Amino acid sequence: EGQTPTEFLSSASESAAAGYEDFRIVQKASDTTLNGIKAAYTESTFITAYSGGRRFPTRSRLWAIPRGKMMFVIAVSGQPDDLKALANEVEMILSTVRFTNE
C-alpha cells in the first residue's frame, strides 16, 4: 500500500531479477495511461526454465493500474517472436479495459 504503479512495477522487476535467469529490463517501469486511467508499464526478457531442462526465452509486458488499495496487473508473456505477432491483438484487448469506479 502507498506505492505508485511505477514503484510497484519497479519492485516487481527487482524481485523477478533475483528469480529468473538472464533477466533484463527492456523498458524501465514508467508512468503511462491505459484508456485515460493512470497506470504504469514495464517490459522485460528472461529465460523460463521447466523441469526436465526445457528452457525458453520469454518476453513479458506488464501494466499496473491502481484501484483504491489494490493494484490490478495485466500481464502478457510469451516467446519474443510470438508477442510481436500478437501485438495488434494485445492492443485490441487493452483498449477494452474499463473501470466503473474511480
Image (spheres, grey):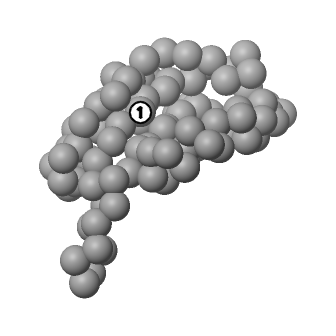
Q: Amino acid at mark 1?
A: Glu
Image spot of residue 87 (x, y percent): 64, 36
Give the structural element (helix, strand or loop) at label 1: strand
- The answer, for residue 69, to whether it is visible in the render is no
Q: Which residue is mark 1?
A: 43
Number of marks in picture: 1
**Residue sitting at x 28%, y 66%:** 55
Q: Left or right of 35: which side holds 39?
A: left
Q: Left or right of 56: which side holds 39?
A: right
- Neighbours of disc 1 within 10 Å: few (<14), some (14-19), many (20+): many
**Residue sitting at x 78%, y 35%:** 92
Q: Quadrant of the N terminus?
A: top left
Image spot of residue 30 (x, y percent): 42, 18
Q: Quadrant of the C terminus?
A: top right
Q: Left or right of 27: which side holds 23?
A: left
**Residue sitting at x 62%, y 18%:** 33
